[in-house]
Amino acid sequence: MTDQTAGTAPAGLSPDEARRADAAHTGPMLAADGTPLKKSLARALRRQKLRALALIAPLLIFVLVTFVVPIGDMLLRSVQNGIVADTLPETVETLSDWDHDGTALPGDDVWTAFYIDMWFAVERKEHTRLGTRLNYELTGMSSMFRKTGRQVDRFDTDVYGEQFVALDPSWGQPQSWAAMLDGPAADALPLTARTWERWKDFNAEEGDKVLEEDIPDFLFTALYHDLTHGAEVEGVSDRLSAAKAAAAEFEPVDLSAQFADADEDLGNIDVWKTLQLYSPRVTSGYFANSVDMQLTPDGIEARPENQQIYGILFKRTLFMSLVITGSCILLAYPVAWLLSNLPMRTANLLMILVLLPFWTSLLVRTSAWKVMLQQQGVINDVLVWLGLVADDARLTMINNQFGTIVAMTHILLPFMILPMYSVMSTIPPSYLRAAKSLGATNWTAFWRVYFPQSVPGIGAGSILVFILAIGYYITPEIVGGNTGTFISNRIAYHISSSLNWGLAAALGTILLAVVLVLYWAYDKIVGIDNVKLG
Amino acid sequence: MKTTASVLALAAVAFTGVAASAQDMANEMTIVSWGGAYQKSQLKAYVEPYVAAHPEVKVVWDESSAEAVAKLRAMNEANNITWDLVDVEAADAIRLCDEGLAKEIDFDGELAAGDDGSSATDDFGESIVSDCFIPQIVFSTTVGYRTDLVGDTPPSDICAIFDLEKYPGKRSLNKRPLANVEWALLCDGVAKEDIYEVLATPEGQDQALAKLGTIKDQVVWWTAGADTPQLLADGEVVMGSTYNGRLFSAIAEQNQPIGMLWDAQMLDFDGWIVPEGLDAPRLARVMDFLKFATDSQRLADQAKWISYGPARASSASLVSTHADLGIEMAPHMPTDPANAKNVFVTQYEFWADYRDDIDAKFQAWLAQ
């Protein structure tokens, strides 16, 4: 094309100048159909990209929907803590002003807010769920919420309603409340107005009409609270002014005493500190727990020593995964070498032996190790029969770290052999022969010529085995005893048994981060280009 | 014109079909249980007779009871409840009820009255530990031992677990604190009635762990009920705790050289919950089945296949003989007066509060 343009260019110009001159004269170069070449090229490329994207789209969507989204959702749970603010909105609001350093329990406004919140929570059966959540942080919260929930609609707060109605029967009519809180009174009575809105929403949820329901005790309690806490009702309505004047003389109900009757734990200042501490919608509490720390009003502190477990488990998981990877390398290298150097027929037979464990259930393989390694098991029996071990001093080889390492090495071995084999089978045997013919000893030829070429296989196998090992669950659960369990066993416990999903998510996030950091370090040290699967 | 008419007719048929099935009961029911011998006893005692009477019903089993709470929570979040009836332990039922994942039951209105005329509430009595929980059986965690490995004086009380001098060798215990800490305190000299008071204090928890510490290096910790019978059969342990039905099966059905203790057995309940949020036809079917499956005779029948005690008082007198072996089952029930001389009843309220705390300490103690 350059030649063509050069041909039509005026004489005396270099081809390059000619082309520029040509472009200036005739505009951009055109494709056969008349569109500019650049555009047409871009369109063709875009179409190609789209086609490629369409081809991988099923996989991409599958991975997104079944993998990325759920895992992302799970990881987010490690900081989510909306349950407190959703269940007890008024309490959280009023509690934010409370000084947790003092020794005094929260004041009237918190008790009133807590009473109203609890009423709604009990009706929606949310209070026990909140109790379970807070029990992770403070023992006893679970039963406290359950007991309080049973009592909350039996409080003596009905005296407020009676006194308001005695003052003016219209207080018993929902219509009068609706009319009042539609007008300027809503600003004067903030708590009452908010509670009225919640009461309306609640009735709508239940399919009831708010104007046909009796005014509940907690609304009168809210009204009493507003009126006795400086509500400015001057000029709003005569009825309110009269009520405010009268409310000062009303017989009050001590809500803190009512709650203390329901459960004495509510008189414990730690309960309120915990509630205040876990009020925010986002918490670092789960992450603190997962590194053996705890959130306190004074900041993050270490847990008592007899409750520290996750540090031990993380370290143990890393250490054992490294040992397992190491023993896999040692065992797999000679096998992979044999596989790639034996005649095809024998190598294939050997390959089937390597693959055989893959076709056996994981549980069967792990249980088989139990039979082999236990004290009355095959290996101990043989040792006793040979006289190497006394009958009353049989070796303990299972339900500890040793058993876990043995069983997991066996289970993960094929993941090491296969990448090693596929790399080694590409190393031409003539290299070794050449090295030897140039005077190298067997060892030098192996170490200087063969081994460096097999490193990418070791790298690939190690990454595979290590990452599989670090998240392993079933084998340590069955043969791990108490010194061979991994962090994943604890994660599983929190997912399925204690239901502390937030903590499980935090532990999982940390594990994921550790793996990514190790991967990065591996890339820096060995180089990810040095990893080959074949 | 003809087409319009037939379309209309078709729509009418479809409509009445929908309306009819909305009133009817669903014909498929997914029941979640534990698998193994226990699920078989439920199949024989409840499901087969029910299906014989209602041949249109198809029952699907799911052996997921061990993860039932977590799975139900996940189903609830996904708004897709695929289970109709779930068999869980009482402690899990309480949690499911707390989380709003299980339906509250009106015992007298929705369940059959006892054969002796007592109301369902009275008949179930103390076993109603939650508003959502319909108890089926009483089971217990208790201790079995190898008769050939304990010498001439087989153990007779629970403290044999901690007696390494008289009964040397390994023992298997549950990898959870429940039962272990109670037994530890009892054998450390704490009076039985004070145990939960002591266990509520950090000092008491340390005391229990210290007592367990005296045998820690001789303990194999189990996570599945089948572990201890297997370990006993292999001679791996001298004694170990497990569920009484597992021991009965090893002793009576498999003739293993195993004996068992009833002393200080930890009684617990197992039963049904109905997931919250089932649609009307499915709910109607489940409640119909439940009314049948939890009546006095059906609960008594279950004891023909497994040695767990029926949760209804009126069923006790109806318990007969083992279906295959023909032996009287009453003496093998944890609730039999001869066996129930010294029992713990699981304190659900206590464990709901203290489980997280004590378990954290227990697991840290195990790992250290």
Image (tube, rainbow, N blue to C red):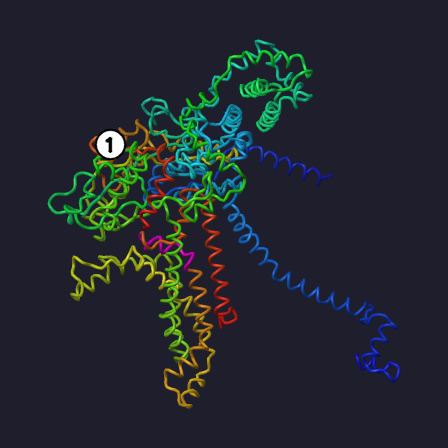
Write down the region rendered in magenta.
Answer: A469-481
> Percent x, y for residue B269?
33, 35
Q: Amino acid at mark 1?
A: Lys
- Residue drawn at x 32%, y 31% as measured from the top left: B311
> Percent x, y for residue B117?
34, 21
Give the SS element for disc 1.
helix
| Quadrant holding the N terminus of chain A | bottom right
Q: Residues within 10 Å of mark 1 (few under 14, many from 20)?
A: some
Position of A44 compared to A75: left or right? right
Q: Is residue B106 above or below residue B176?
A: above
Q: Quadrant of residue B43?
A: top left
> Percent x, y for residue A293?
42, 46
- Residue drawn at x 34%, y 61% as measured from the top left: A405
Q: Is residue B26 above or below residue A394?
A: above
- Secondary structure mostly taken by the magenta-highlighted segment of the chain: helix
Residue wearing tag 1? B192
Asked if residue A479 lies in the magenta stretch, the reply is yes
Asked if residue A332 lies in the magenta stretch, the reply is no
Is residue A36 among what the camera can see? yes
